DNA sequence: AACATATTTGG
DNA sequence: CAAATATGT
């Protein structure tokens, strides 16, 4: 690389000094300027929520003080355009190199690629590294060289890769600071006065920052880990690792987690402690799911907003904001669900099991569009993580090959006695039920009047009756599903007839937008009423997305890299469908929605998704065997469509998830698979 | 106590 | 659907 100037380390979600390959490489190269750029408008709808921003603020302060003790400090920049700000920083510091670690969400895949292009064009050396995963997504493939389509296969492969994940790097002993005197920091504002008050209590329960992450890891490994297999089903036990927010911001490296946990496992295995060994396997599986979420995001960069199995696109969602509100407020009448939602609102945290309960209730019982729920999680979770959350909701929604079946409704009453057998969790979060005996705690609607009276409960008044009955939900779900298959078949027939004009128009003309404002602080507690006949809506496009708001003819302006925001909420749009330009028939008809609330466009999509087959080697070059090179600073990961012809591309991306026949064979959901397969043959 | 049958669960 | 667990004879 060009010599002379200093190096920029661009921190993002890798807020640590230990095992940070970009930092280590930059330190090795000479003087370093560390930068963090805050450009939340670029995240569009996925502008970080209140508690997430609180965490980020603390974590950055922590990182800054660590850097100071090593001889440098963190330059912070407020920006509406990350790439031009990067350029400014480079110019102001006279840097000749840029180092950063990979991210895999759709926005970053595009932005980072663009950053590399732009800076390289200015003669800056750009190097990027894997700091977030055990293995880069392009290195994990099945025997045929295709990406896995189920978690089990993926994780099995990860655990049997020829090389173990890299050993963690030590923190640098000392950093020679580059000259940033002409590059003043901006003050970053992460919370307003109102939010400050709401956030005040968070610090009691959580300590952001990489060294605290390290402590949390040690505490977990030496404590709850061994019992993990036993306790992981308890709703309110403190037996989880509580690492997820630390991991989200990269305060601790998964590779370090992996190695330390593995060491414990070996130890326990030698002692013949089978419970401990099993616990480690289960814990590592949840680490694996995090890996898998990045893997899916890389291979299917629209998976946060479109179901991976195509038929779900025809599901008639219930668009009923009253239900949505009742769910958010924890007033559905199902105690376990309500307790979970109140905990989430109060603390920004939910046990994994309870996340499954509330989201499954959301999708299966209320039949609300899953992306509403995902967005609410995004806004409220302390560990909100686009890739993980998208994977979770897709799993719940039955839109992955290895999802739960869509038609299976979990019974919150039974789950209640499973995860919270004594009702302690419910009583903690639903004080109005605190005097109800355990026998009725998870189904107060069955309790005798005398019992309710003794407990001071008046159903429908100080605690709601079930917002939707389970059998009604079941019937409604079956109806909706048969409608879905009908629509799907109709659409298939249209495709097969070759009369594509108007495709989807009849059934998909009403995209589902986000409810305008998810204002949570000041909601009245009016219980939502059960609606005899609900409005249903096809298409789960909650956010009128890139897919809908970008039109092909706009491409020429993409180079401007300006963020354009809407009057509505002042946020730019998330880049989503990287394949936009490859889906002529579908998308042209589909979601162009001029009146959509969000019309702002992604600033930088140029290049991606438009590449010719020849240029397309990027993906290939990652996939090549020299994965080691990444550590030493090689390529920037860039998503590009799997090479291959157009038609195949369309089908794969439209209907899910890879076409590997290993997935088709032996998969049980024959109905779906047959449809899916036939769809893919029509591409 | 061994064995068939029902129910739950699974990423 | 298939494996694991629970229930029943």
Image (spheres, coloured by chain):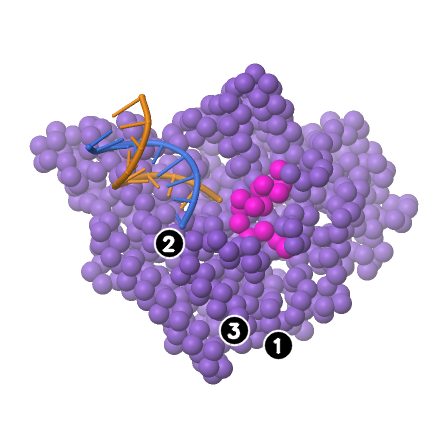
Chain colours: A purple, B orange, C blue
The residue at the far left in this view is A450
Give left or right: position of C9 versus A306.
left
Give left or right: position of A467 versus A198.
left
Q: Residue A155 magenta-drawn?
A: yes
Magenta region: which residues? A146-159
Residue A271 picture location, percent across and down: 56, 16
**If you read the primary sequence from the N terminus, does the residue marked by circle 3 or circle 2 appear first?**
2
| Residue position marked by numbered label 1 in the rendering | A553
Q: Which mark is residue A682?
A: 3
Q: Are marks 1 and 3 in contact (CB under 8 Å)?
A: no
Magenta stretch: dominant secondary structure: helix
Residue A265 picture location, percent across and down: 58, 24
Residue drawn 74% across and 28% down?
A: A170
Depth order, front residue of A381/A609: A609
**If you read the primary sequence from the N terminus, does the residue marked by circle 1 or circle 3 appear first?**
1
| Residue position marked by numbered label 2 in the rendering | A406
Residue A314 picture location, percent across and down: 40, 66
The residue at the far top in this view is A271
Q: Residue A619 magenta-drawn?
A: no
Which quadrant of the structure image shows residue A482?
bottom left
Q: In this picture, is A219 found above or below A594?
A: above
- Are there few (<14), some (14-19), or many (20+) residues within 10 Å of tag 1? few
The secondary structure type at the circle numbered 2 is loop
Q: Are marks 1 and 2 in contact (CB under 8 Å)?
A: no
The subunit letter for the residue under badge 2 reads: A
């Amino acid at each position: 690389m060009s010599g002379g100037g200093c190096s920029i380390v661009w921190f993002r979600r890798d807020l640590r000094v230990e095992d940070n390959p970009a930092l280590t490489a930059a330190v090795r190269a000479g003087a370093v300027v560390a930068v963090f750029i805050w450009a939340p408008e670029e995240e569009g709808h996925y502008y970080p929520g209140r508690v997430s921003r609180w965490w980020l603020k603390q974590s950055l302060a922590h990182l800054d003080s660590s850097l100071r003790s090593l001889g440098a400090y963190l330059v912070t920049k407020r920006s509406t355009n990350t790439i031009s700000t990067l350029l400014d920083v480079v110019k102001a510091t006279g840097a000749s190199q840029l180092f950063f670690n990979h991210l895999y969400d759709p926005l970053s895949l595009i932005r980072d690629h663009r950053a590399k292009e732009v800076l390289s064009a200015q003669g800056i050396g750009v190097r990027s590294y894997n700091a977030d995963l055990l293995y880069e997504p392009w290195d994990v493939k099945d025997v045929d060289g295709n990406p896995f389509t189920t978690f089990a296969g993926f994780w099995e492969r990860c655990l049997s890769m020829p090389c173990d994940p890299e050993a963690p790097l030590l923190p640098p002993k000392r950093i020679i600071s580059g000259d940033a005197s002409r590059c003043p920091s901006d003050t970053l504002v992460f919370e307003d006065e109102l939010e400050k008050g709401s956030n005040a209590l968070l610090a009691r329960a959580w300590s952001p920052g990489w060294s605290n992450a390290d402590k949390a890891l040690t505490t977990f490994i030496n404590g709850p880990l061994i019992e993990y297999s036993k306790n992981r089903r308890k709703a309110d036990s403190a037996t989880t690792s509580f690492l997820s927010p630390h991991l989200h911001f990269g305060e601790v490296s998964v590779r370090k987690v992996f190695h330390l946990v593995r060491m414990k496992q070996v130890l326990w295995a030698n002692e013949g402690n089978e419970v401990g060994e099993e616990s480690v396997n289960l814990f590592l599986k949840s680490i694996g799911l995090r890996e898998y979420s990045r893997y899916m995001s890389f291979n299917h960069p629209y998976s946060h907003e479109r179901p991976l199995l195509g038929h779900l696109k025809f599901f008639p969602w219930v668009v009923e904001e009253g239900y949505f509100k009742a769910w958010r407020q924890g007033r559905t009448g199902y105690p376990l669900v309500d307790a979970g939602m109140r905990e989430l609102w109060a603390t920004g945290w939910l046990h994994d099991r309870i996340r499954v309960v509330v989201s499954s209730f959301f999708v299966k019982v209320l039949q609300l569009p899953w992306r509403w729920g995902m967005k609410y999680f995004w806004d409220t979770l302390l560990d909100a993580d686009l890739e993980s959350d998208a994977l979770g909701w897709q799993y719940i929604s039955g839109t992955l090959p290895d999802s739960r079946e869509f038609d299976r409704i979990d019974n919150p009453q039974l789950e209640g006695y499973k995860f919270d057998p004594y009702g302690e969790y419910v009583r903690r979060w639903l004080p109005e039920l605190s005097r109800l005996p355990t026998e009725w705690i998870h189904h107060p609607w069955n309790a005798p009047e005398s019992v309710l009276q003794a407990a001071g409960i008046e159903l429908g008044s100080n605690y709601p009756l079930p917002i939707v009955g389970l059998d009604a939900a079941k019937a409604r779900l079956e109806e909706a599903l048969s409608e879905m298959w009908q629509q799907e078949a109709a659409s298939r027939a249209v495709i097969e007839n070759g009369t594509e004009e108007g495709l989807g128009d009849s059934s998909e003309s009403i995209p589902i937008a986000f409810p305008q404002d998810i204002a949570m602080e000041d909601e009245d507690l009016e219980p939502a009423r059960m609606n005899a006949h609900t409005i249903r809506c096809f298409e789960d496009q909650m956010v009128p997305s890139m897919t809908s708001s970008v039109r092909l003819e706009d491409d020429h302006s993409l180079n401007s890299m300006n963020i354009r925001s809407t009057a509505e909420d002042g946020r730019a749009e998330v880049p989503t469908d990287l394949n936009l330009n490859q889906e002529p028939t579908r998308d042209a008809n589909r979601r162009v929605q001029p009146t959509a609330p969000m019309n702002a466009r992604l600033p930088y999509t140029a290049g991606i998704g438009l590449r010719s087959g020849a240029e397309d080697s990027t993906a290939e070059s990652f996939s090549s065997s020299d994965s080691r090179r990444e550590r030493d600073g090689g390529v920037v990961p860039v998503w590009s469509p799997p090479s291959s012809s157009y038609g195949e591309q369309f089908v794969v991306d439209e209907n899910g998830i890879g076409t590997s026949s290993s997935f088709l064979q032996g998969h049980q959901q024959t109905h779906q698979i047959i449809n899916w397969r036939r769809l893919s043959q029509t591409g």
